[in-house]
Amino acid sequence: MVTAPPLTETTSAQERLDLPIARAVPEVTRGAATLRKLDVYTPRQALFYLPFRYDDFSDLRPLGDLVADEKQSARARVTDVKVEPGFGRRPQRVIAQLADETGSAEAIWFGRRFVERRLKAGDELVVSGKVVMRGWRPQFVSPDFSPAGAASIHTGRIVPVYPLVGGLTQRRVRELLARVLGRTLRAVQDPLHEDEREGLPGLAAALKAAHFPDDPGEVRPALDRLAHDELLALQLVLAQARAARAGQRAPRIPVAVDEAATLESALPFTLTGDQHRAITEVLDDLGAELPMRRLLQGDVGSGKTAVAAVAMAAVCRAGWQAVLMAPTEILARQHHLGLAPLLEALGVRAEFLSGSLSPARKRAIHAAIESGEIEVAIGTHAVISRGVVFRRLGLAVVDEQHRFGVSQRAALQAKGQTLEPHLLALTATPIPRTLALTVYGDLSISTIEQMPPGRQPVRTEIRDRAALPRIQEFIAAEAAAGRQSFVVVPLVVESEAMAAASAEAEASRLSAELPQLRIGVVHGQQKSELRDATMARFAAAELDVLVATTVVEVGIDVPNASVMLIEDAERFGLAQLHQLRGRVGRGPHRSFCILLSDADDPVARRRLEVVKGSTDGFAIAEEDLKLRGAGNLLGTRQSGLPPLRVASLFDPRHLKLAERARELAQRLVAADPGLAARPELIRLRDDFAPRDEEGDAA
Ligand code: ADP
Ligand code: MG
């Protein structure tokens, strides 16, 4: 065992922040084990272990003014304490009678918690907790309490409530964090100079107020400061990456105007104006020596693939190779199926690559990629596996780019040899423009807003569950007419297993009610071969109905599908509803999207009305941003934005902070690219920058 050197005067206060808690704050030796359960090992981690809400117990009410079903605080005298022993399965109960000049109340605690040892008749207490009414008498249920007059962190003030894991109590964690804060807050140095934080509180003050605000008004500026730092960390990463790339070179692949025209006219349709403009922007970038980093945004079905196809063909006809990476096997196959003949017609050979191919087949393809015989590789993330070596990679395309982590995109770009390939990332997730610029600030953006001609508008209706029998009849009628339907089961964020179970249950229910229909089910708990096979059967019209969790969201193209039924639609993000709706109306048939919802909450209704009333993904995303306001993690996850802890990119105020952080990061990195003179900023960047999420397994 390595014995730690003793703490000495020379251990700076700063360094103490990163020692194990038990060493830095000797009085929490035993508590250290408790904090470890929360993944808190050092004082610094404790300082940033933030409450997720606050209970305002600062207002002490007379007992006579207590109301039911609210958390409240009161100052009262204990008139009696009684312990009722547990009996059978009933736990022990401790009941204290409380009184003040205005009335009386009772406080009750369940289980052997030894509260009686801290209570006796005659004590003056501040009691804080949830109140219920027992007849006409208010009762505090398992409240916190402390002697009146003594300062307490649990009662009679604004009390932080922390995320916990099993076996821990708020009281215990609050006490430990308060102790660590008390001992180490002084050591916190502000990584920002005063002029850099422009009106936001200093870091130590912000941390103090984020945990133990003295006044409700302190919380928001404190959290703003912490959100700002988190956003600054992200922006520092982006600014440094930008600076590092400034030295990189990509192959220059100039494409002549008549060559571009040749490629465009090889497509089986006339491009929309937006597609043509996007292609021009991409081809312009390819002609430059700087690596292209372009995000192509366009609604579901807007025809992004055609843009990628022209770019890939141009690159290959100039003697370079291209790769297209898609997030699922079925999507990659669909791309290969659609693109290979097109590319073939232009003299370019494309091949499909995925982990599901036989080892021999994979080896053969790897060899042909390495020799340059295969010019375009289309596949899943198998294309970034180690065995894949390109001879001359000029262009990397990532479809549904938000489904990949930063490192997977980086791995794809690293497939170039001495030159960096150009990167084209496609996404149908309509990120509001302001947001995209802030978060993907280092990417150029092309946008397709126009839909290809002849697209059927999808009729969207909102219905409640009572309408389900009629909807099922409708699905059956569509099937009889040769059409197909998607049924998407309610979104379950808690676990994929629960979502899977509800998909299976819904599929059996539908099979029982509509025995004449061929019904399949896909969800994330299935083996990918089974899921892909079922999707393929649906695509081949061998199934009438596909019951699915949100796995269908990504890109599959089934022009014969005419109904999208989404159950408990209020649980989905609007962007996601819009994406799901985009799965129908892709063929010549009139199509329907039915949003099933029993929610009567007015905001939920309004959100669904937004989807019903608009076909513009960007407008829907902006509207969702307005309606939902702050702090919706779900929205962040769905949109593929980086996971942030404090900041919410759906909060317009934080979006402003993000812009400000972007400018500051730019300035800091321009002055000192390695941030060598500002180690506190490096530590901020490394502590706060969002980690890469794990991608799907191969
Ligand atoms: P997405 O942007 O969702 O990836 P796709 O590229 O898959 O959309 O295109 C959707 C469908 O529209 C495809 O079947 C494609 O062939 C077709 N398409 C794309 N562009 C046009 C166009 N300009 N005119 C007609 N059909 C088009
Ligand atoms: Mg697509």
Image (cartoon, rainbow, N blue to C red):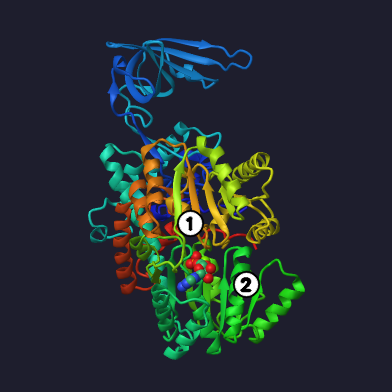
Query: Measured from the top left, where is residue 308 in percent x and y?
Result: 50, 75
Q: Is mark 1 within 8 Å of ligand 1?
A: no
Q: Is mark 2 within 8 Å of ligand 1?
A: no
**Which label sits on residue 579?**
1
Query: Measured from the top left, where is residue 265 in percent x and y?
Result: 49, 83
Query: Measured from the top left, where is residue 228 in percent x and y?
Result: 33, 55
- Secondary structure of the residue carrying tag 1 is helix
**Which of the two residues, 593 or 68, is positioned nearer the viewer here?**
593
When asked about the image quadrant of residue 448, the answer is: bottom left
> Badge 2 is on which residue?
337
Residue 641 shown left or right of residue 403 in the figure: left
Residue 79, above or below 321? above
- Secondary structure of the residue carrying tag 2 is helix
Cα distance, mark 2 to mark 1?
22 Å
Q: How many marks?
A: 2
Amino acid type, mark 1:
Gln
Q: Residue at x 34, y 43 (%)?
A: 210
Q: In which quadrant is the C terminus drawn?
A: bottom right
Residue 578 shown left or right of residue 372 in the figure: left
Amino acid type, mark 2:
Leu
Can residue 643 be seen in this snapshot? Answer: no
When asked about the image quadrant of residue 238, the answer is: bottom left
Classed neighbour count for the residue bearing mark 1: other residues with Cα under 10 Å, few (<14), some (14–19), many (≥20)? many
Classed neighbour count for the residue bearing mark 2: other residues with Cα under 10 Å, few (<14), some (14–19), many (≥20)? some
Disc nearer the start of the sequence (2/1): 2
Asked whether the beta carbons under mark 2 and mark 1 sit within 8 Å of each other, the answer is no
Can residue 455 be seen in this snapshot? Answer: yes
Query: Measured from the top left, where is residue 475 in percent x and y?
Result: 58, 47
